Amino acid sequence: MSDILLAGYEPFGEFERNPARQLAIRLDGDRIGDATVIGREFPVVFDRLRPELEAAVDEHDPEIVCGLGLAAGRNALSLERVGINLRDTGGIPDNDDREPVDQPAVHDGPNAYFTTLPVRSMKEAMLEAGVPTTLSTDAGTHACNNFLYLTRHLAETSDRAFRAGFVHVPFSHEQAAARDDGEPSLALEAMRDGLLAGLEEAVGTP
Amino acid sequence: MSDILLAGYEPFGEFERNPARQLAIRLDGDRIGDATVIGREFPVVFDRLRPELEAAVDEHDPEIVCGLGLAAGRNALSLERVGINLRDTGGIPDNDDREPVDQPAVHDGPNAYFTTLPVRSMKEAMLEAGVPTTLSTDAGTHACNNFLYLTRHLAETSDRAFRAGFVHVPFSHEQAAARDDGEPSLALEAMRDGLLAGLEEAVGTP
Amino acid sequence: MSDILLAGYEPFGEFERNPARQLAIRLDGDRIGDATVIGREFPVVFDRLRPELEAAVDEHDPEIVCGLGLAAGRNALSLERVGINLRDTGGIPDNDDREPVDQPAVHDGPNAYFTTLPVRSMKEAMLEAGVPTTLSTDAGTHACNNFLYLTRHLAETSDRAFRAGFVHVPFSHEQAAARDDGEPSLALEAMRDGLLAGLEEAVGTP
Amino acid sequence: MSDILLAGYEPFGEFERNPARQLAIRLDGDRIGDATVIGREFPVVFDRLRPELEAAVDEHDPEIVCGLGLAAGRNALSLERVGINLRDTGGIPDNDDREPVDQPAVHDGPNAYFTTLPVRSMKEAMLEAGVPTTLSTDAGTHACNNFLYLTRHLAETSDRAFRAGFVHVPFSHEQAAARDDGEPSLALEAMRDGLLAGLEEAVGTP
């Protein structure tokens, strides 16, 4: 039996809601094949991510760790392919008011880690489920990139064998409607369906 | 008792599906306050629109005529405010292979008609329902603009007293997923909810 | 001998510079065929536009009146095809702090006026000159639409025989660089070249 | 005395012109501080890039190697921060009809290299020069990313001490006008000015 740790970021910056968090909580407890989803909210705080990640991995010993974060302005679920060893908050502080600029995520860490989720076949499964999905090589330089880099670093440097990835999610329809700003969005339900289809593919592709 | 004629355009050009048509058919028969939705598919053919409109109006004597058409690339339901007396297909022929360029919709017709639906309060109701919606002053110069102009012209020049409007709809999620082209979309279900909320507002605001 | 009144809007709202004004002033005095450009700054004030327009038209008796206004976010010079009888400032007051919402530009005026400039051949000439240019049917509902509607109304209701149009201009490169916000822009020099090519076409196509 | 190798990619795919190549050729021979620009066209061919790069580096012993490539749809010069060890042509073959999918640029190479140009201060200098410029963490997975990764790999694995970077350039105005497709663009002259300002900053910031 294996678990999928689905880590959704909390609200931050100008965003009072975060569909990433909503999705993690909504999928918590769902079964995907033999696996159970452990949906958890994670803080948008650079200094707290690593200890909270390590604690969650120690507690659940997941087979897969998948982060979820909001990417304002995107049209589709974005399967991130690479996390880089760079923190640059670009004017948006984390929730502990830290604003690292051009700092590494891990001192003396490698420049980048690729995701170990089968993102290409996941994308196909998610499109098949009718959910707009794309591969991305731009996880940015904020908390989302940080999550992907750190989880992969943890996997490489600990004796835990989990696979790791990150999915950027657009605004939800409700959120876009409340903002009334003309930005693209996806239905929360569709994002849920897409994640389920993608994770099912990941679970079945060891 | 009154009816709402909801006219969704059929597929055209490169688009094998048209969420406009899907929505018209899906809402057919729905009750909105005292009104019943008559959902009908309409042809993307300049020469056939007017007779089909007149026939449908004669048959159903609707209180409201609302057209639905696809606007590739938009993020939100767009409540069109104005239809202009101009046909310019811009390289996309109608389904009868006609490509009018800079022709009027109605010879000697006025330059434009404003919608007679209460689009501002409809927008608020639709946003309230959690559905991304915007007011638009650009119905284009193809079949959609033609629908708005002609229905308003019909209302002004006949003894029928119906109100008329047009809603541009984005790609559906399924359609965007199948195209795999990175374009924005809305869930068909959300578009349905938005239309219902908007039409309810319109019915209640005589 | 004939004149072209080129009316560029002043800065407004969040925009401390306005390339529309810069272009009007830069082209002031240029010869285009037999015509001379009269480049003037115009106020972004609904109540002052009509008297200032009438005064300028009385003074110069132009053959062509062409307005210029900023359209943030556009990629190309936009030749507007239609002005509508609607003012809706959408949260951006004019420079006299007026914010009309859903008011007509002219009470009992027609719903819309089409431009009387030969915008299709102007577009071709401007593209030929290497300047990104598009036809637009969305002049908005703010001061720019108001300019096009009012100049056309003036032409139709006075004994002046001038032709009238409006060109929306993107940010200039300098402006986009200073804003550092990732928005599209055109070189001011290219906008100048495009306007000259377009106006030359207009002058030669009576 | 030192040289700057400015390597602009040739036309490829659907693009008959490439402003990257035009800029490299236009700047060839320009002096920047003590350095001279060696502007060269490079082939969009995965298998030929490395030998041609090595030959050019051997011939010119440059202090800086800077690649230039077209990024359709971008609004600004993009200073790429990172090249990743991944080739994925996404349906656009190189000019030798190769379409690698999910292949490494260098077998057993590190996952990524960061640019060694001072991109942050270069960006400031380029904005100061009035040219829209942005930092980017998405060089893609095609020839452009390949250039950045390979030049950095060459610098790390040879005894040459050059610094390396890559700048994505938008369509030129002329190109966007010829395409007539509504896409953003920059004036070639502005791109030239921006590159000169950026390279001057790079030369002066050892």
Image (cartoon, coloured by chain):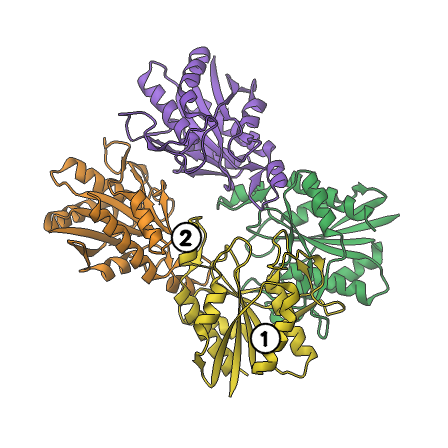
Chain colours: A yellow, B orange, C purple, D green
Q: Residue furthest bottom?
A: A1
D94 on left or right of A8: right
Amino acid type for the residue under numbered disc 2: Ala
Vertical arrangement, residue B168 with respect to residue B81, above or below: below
Vertical arrangement, residue C153 with respect to residue B195, above or below: above
In the depicted view, which residue is nearer to us: A2 or B55? Answer: A2
Distance from the alpha carbon under mark 2 to that under mark 1: 33 Å
Q: Which mark is residue B36?
A: none
Q: Residue at x 26, y 54 (%)?
A: B8
| Disc 1 secondary structure class | strand
Q: Residue at x 29, y 59 (%)?
A: B192
> Which is nearer the N-term, disc 2 or disc 1?
1
Amino acid type for the residue under numbered disc 1: Ala
Q: What is the count of numbered marks? A: 2
Q: Quadrant of residue C18?
A: top right
Q: Residue A125: in sight, yes or no? A: no
Q: Which mark is residue A164?
A: 1
D34 on left or right of C51: right
**Residue B35: percent from the left, percent from the top?**
16, 53
Q: Quadrant of residue D109?
A: bottom right
**Residue D105: percent from the left, percent from the top?**
68, 68
In the depicted view, which residue is nearer to us: D6 or A193? Answer: A193
Disc 2: which residue? A178
Vertical arrangement, residue D166 with respect to residue C200, above or below: below
| Disc 2 secondary structure class | helix
Dot 1: within a 10 Å radius of its alpha carbon, few (fewer than 14), some, or many (20 or more) residues? Answer: many
